[in-house]
Amino acid sequence: MLMSLVSCREDSYVIPLTKDNDVMNDEMYSPEVKIDQVKNGTVDVAQWVWNGDRLTDIRLSGNTEGTVKFSYAGDRVKEVVTTTDEQRRLVYTYSNNMLKRYSIFIDGDQKGTALVTRNSEDRISGANITFSGQYVIDMMQRFRNGDNTLISKYAMPQEFATLLDGMGATLDETASKETHNFKLVFNWYKGNVASEVLNGSVRLEIDPQRVVEDLSVLSAEMRMMVYSYLSSHNQLPVKVSFTDIATYTYDEMHNPYHGYLGDGLTAKCLSKNNILTATTKANMRIDILIGSLEIPLMNRNVNQESAYTYLYNDGGFPVHIARDGLTVIDYCE
């Protein structure tokens, strides 16, 4: 997939990397070098609209038609509403001008909330994320469609969602009415997110006919318990636990997305520099739930590495970005 980001505002100038702006400090996203247009290949275009120093709209055309609208409370982003074939709304809440939480709504229904945590220096250190039970299944559908927005990307790597879908995973009646909790932690080094760690679990039901081979490797005692349970039940209850660890390295140049809240909290928006390498190690463990017992069924790992290379303008901002040798961004001559 080719993506280009072109034409920064001509009246823009470079932000010096001083102590005051070396990390996102909860103020309005207003970079001195402002994105004007993002091109995805030769078809999709995102036109960024500014009112002075404020980003007000992103207008989408091409294969994806729609808008992204930003509204403010004072100098803070209050809401980001993305309207395409559905409406996604991010709502940000502050206390003493510091970000405290943000929530996601899909077509008017609240799906999840992230409560922001901070370290002793008041730097954002992560989030405690809760989302509705039905959104678990919705996430699997979103990942199959390539969506990576907000709460969903903090809950289930695409490979795991595909695996669970192949197991006929559904929510039981109790779990569908519950909220599910994940914990996200950012680890910092010199103004950048050096790593992020996500942990959490959900309860699902799977089709035992789709995991016959996995059941066959259980001990005789465990198999007997499972098949005894299945003699009076059609579905197998499981707990699915996730751990996702991403580590990053950075260049020493300016990141034009520093402070951008269009997609919730990410390493990209929090860090002052541009990512050079990203390494992700994700683990999914599935345990069968029989009474109070948790019987290990399977353990899966997914590792992924990406490398980014850049060309920069005289002000130290990227003009060309390539991921794993493929062009993903061109902008700002």
Image: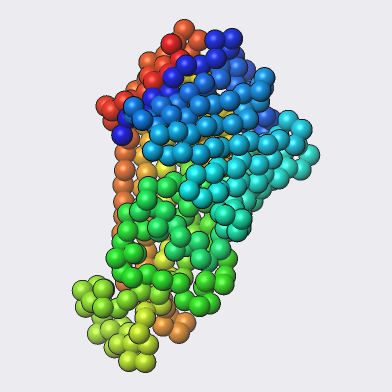
- Is residue 155 visible to the viewer in this orientation of the structure? yes
Q: Report how many numbered discs are placed on residues in the image.
A: 0
Q: Position of residue 118 (x, y in %)?
A: 65, 43
Give the vertical position of 90 relative to 171 (above or below).
above
Give whichever of 4, 189 is nearer the camera. Answer: 4
Placement of the C terminus among the 4 image quadrants: top left
Q: Check the image and report above or below for 155 versus 121.
A: below
Name the side, left or right, on which 2 lies relative to 127. left
Q: Position of residue 304 (x, y in %)?
A: 31, 43
Q: Nearer the viewer, residue 230 or 52?
A: 52
Q: Is residue 308 depicted above or below 286 in this figure? A: above
Location of residue 207 in the rendering, given as x and y in whole percent from the top left corner: 32, 76
Q: Is residue 260 left or right of residue 76?
A: left
Q: Residue at x 41, y 27 (%)?
A: 39
Give me the residue at 31% from left, 51% from top: 302
Q: Percent x, y for residue 56?
A: 63, 30
- Residue closer to the observer: 232 or 43: 43
The N terminus is located in which quarter? top left
